[in-house]
Image (cartoon, coloured by chain):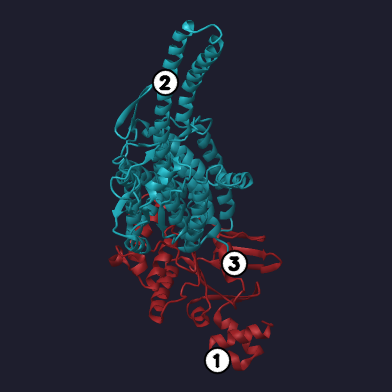
Amino acid sequence: MPAAIQARGIVRRFGDREALRGVSFSAGVGELVAVIGPNGAGKTTLLSILAGIAKADEGEVASAEGAVGWVPQQAALYRRLTVEENLLLFARLEGHEDPRASAAEMLELTGLGERRGEIVARLSGGNQQRINIAIGLLSRPAVLLLDEPSVGLDPRQRARLWEFVSGLAGRGTTVIFSTHDIQEAERYGGRVLVLADGESLFDGSAEELREAVRGEAPEAADRDFETAFVAYLQHRGH
Amino acid sequence: MRGVRWLLLKDLQILRRSPLQAVLLVAYPILIAVLVGFAISRGPEDPRVAFLNEVPPNTRIDVGGAELPKSNVEEQICERVECVLVADHDEAREKVESGDVLAALILPANLVNRINSLSTLTPGVPEVEVLVNEENAVKAELVDDRITTLLAEANLRIARRIGKEGGRYLGLIVNGGQFKVLGEAIPILGLATSARILEQVTPALPPRLRPALEEVTEFASQARDNLDVAKPLIDRLAQPIAVDKVVVGGDSPPLEIFAIAVAATLTLAFVVVLLVAGSLALEREENAFSRLTRGLVSDGGLLGEKVLLGVVVGMAVTLLMLFGMKIFTPLDLGRVPLWLVAILFSAAALGAAGAALGAAAREVRAVSLLAFMVTLPVAFLSLVPSGAVGPAVFDAIRIFTALFPFKPALEAITAALDEAGQGIGGPLIHLTVLFLAYVAIARLALRRFATV
C-alpha cells in the first residue's frame, strides 16, 4: 500500500521534557489509523506535527504539499455564524474557485444541508463536530488528522460520526485519529499506534496487539480490548 | 489580502449578529453626544440656596452720615443662585438637612447696623449666617466656592460704594459744592476756591502779613493738587489688585471643543481597544487561530485585519458622534478631512494597542477586563493638567500617558476640531510611533497565542 504520509524519527521537546522520542510511522492511502495511549503520551503533539501546526525538533514528515487536513479536538469554527457561512468562509480563505459549490458539497457530505442556515452555537456537539470535520475536508486532503473527534458526544452522535469518517476512508482518504476510547480504536481503527511517554510502543492491528498480550498476560488477552491494552502498557512499565 | 477581506467581513457579520454589541456601538456614541451636547450648550445650573432676609425693610447703609443708594440685596443674590425663600431659621435648616437646597444664607436683623458701625469709633463685625450640609467632599467644595464668591462680590460692592462716596466727599473738599445734612444743603467752599480767594486778598494785606498768608495759599494749592491724585487711589481701594492675564503657552481650545474632543477620544479608545482585543481573543476561544494560521492567513495578516476592523468601526462610531455633536455646537465641517486623518491615525494606534492586549491576555473576558483596566486610568491621567500635581508626579504621568495612544489621540482630535489650536503633526507622529511599537509587541505576543 503506498504511503500517504510518513513520519521519521520525530522528536519534540518542551523545555527539558521530551514529548516525543523518535517516533516513526506511516499510513497508506485509505487507511484508518488510531493513535492511542495514556494522558501525556504525545498523541496530540504527534498529530500537531503531522498537521504542520507544531514543528518537530528532530525528524521529518513527508506528505504531498497541502494534502493534510486538520481537525482539532475542539471544534474550530465560528459559533455565531451559520453552518453554511462557516463553510463558505473557509472555502473562500482556501481560495476555492467556486466557494458556494464547495460548501454545498460539504453540506451534502455531512448531511447537514437542511440545517445550513442554522447558527452553529445552536447545533448539538455531534453536528458541530461534523462541520468541524467538513471544514478540515474543504481542501480535499489525501490525509485527514482528527484529534479526539468523539470527545463529548453521546453514543448515537458517536456512531453517526464514525459512520461518516469510515465513509471518507472508504472513498480513499487516509484518516489518522487520536482517541482515549480504546474500544473505539479497536472498532474503527484498521491499525493502532500505541504511544506512551513519547515513545511508539506498538504499531499494528488490534488483533496483533491482543496476540502480543497473549504471550505476556493470557487472561487479559481474552477479555475486552481495553484490558488487553492496559496489560500491554503495564508489562512495559507504563 | 484576500484572507484579510473575508475575515473582516466575517467579523462584521459576527458583530451585526450580536444585537447587544451592535446596539451599544450605535447607542453609546449617540448617548454620549447628546449628554455632552446638552452639558456644553446649557451651561451649569444655578445652585439652590435657601434665603432668609431678617434685615428690617427700608434700612439703608449709612457712610459718614449719608445713606448709600438703596441696593436690593435679595434681588442681587438671587441673580446668582436659585433662591428658595424661607420664613425662619428652622425652615432654612430643614431644607439644608434634607438636601433640598445646597445651603442657606441668612442675613441677620442687625447686619446693616453693624455695617454702618464700620465708619464709627466703635466698629462692629458684620456677619451673615450660612448653613451647609457637607455630606460629601465634592458638594462641600462646591458650597464653599459659591458662598466665598457671593461674599466676595458683596464685599466688593460695599467697598465700591464706600469708595465712591469717599471720592465724592474728597471732590467737595477740593472743588467745593453743596453737602446735604438732614435735608438741608450746606455750601462747602473747597480748597480751590479758598486758594483763589486768598490769592485775591493777599495784595490788600499789610506786607508783614503777606508771607504767612502766602504759606496758607501755597498749602491750599498743594492740598488741592495732591488730593486730586488721591481720588483714583481711593477708587482702587475697592479692588486694589487688577488681573492682567497673559497666555504664554498651551493654546487651549475653547472648553466646548475640548469637551467634544475628550468625549470623542474616549469613545474611540473604548470601542477600538475592546473590539480589536476582543475579536483577536475570540479567534483563540473559537479555536480558529491555529486553523487560520495554518496557511490560510499569516500572523501579520490576522493582526492587520483586526486593526482594520477597529479602524472601520471606530471611525464610523466617532464620526456618528461628532455629527451628533454638530446639532448642539457649531463644528466647522470644512475641517472634516482633518477629522478623518486624526481619527484614522488614532484608531490605528489604539487598534494596535488593542491587538497587543488581546494577544497578551488571550481570553475574551480577561481581555475585556484588561482593556478597561488600562484604558480608563490612562484616559483620566491624560486629562491631569500641569500644576494640578507636583512636578515629579506630573513628569511620571506624562511619561506613562505617552506610552498609550489615548493622549496623542486626544491632542490630534482636538487639533483637528479647533482651528486656532496647536498643530496636528506632532500628535500624528507620536501615534505612528506607538502604532509600530504596539504592532511589534502584538506580533511577539501572538507567537505563544495558540500554544498555551
The quarter holding residue B209 reads: top right
Mark 3, other Cα within 10 Å: few <14 / some 14–19 / many ≥20:
many
Give coordinates of residue B329: x percent, y percent. 32, 39
Q: Residue at x 36, y 45 (%)?
A: B316
Give coordinates of residue A232: x percent, y percent. 63, 84
Q: Is residue A193 above or below residue A235?
A: above
- Chain B on-screen colour: cyan
B145 left or right of B61 in image: right
Q: Nearer the viewer, mark 2 or mark 1?
A: 2
Q: What chain letter is assigned to the residue under label 2?
A: B
Mark 1 or 3, nearer chain start: 3
Distance Cα–Cα, label 1 vs label 3: 31 Å
* Front-lying residue, A8 or B107: B107
Q: Quadrant of the C terminus of chain B?
A: bottom right
Q: Secondary structure at mark 2?
A: loop
Q: Residue at x 42, y 59 (%)?
A: A138
B370 left or right of B45 in image: right
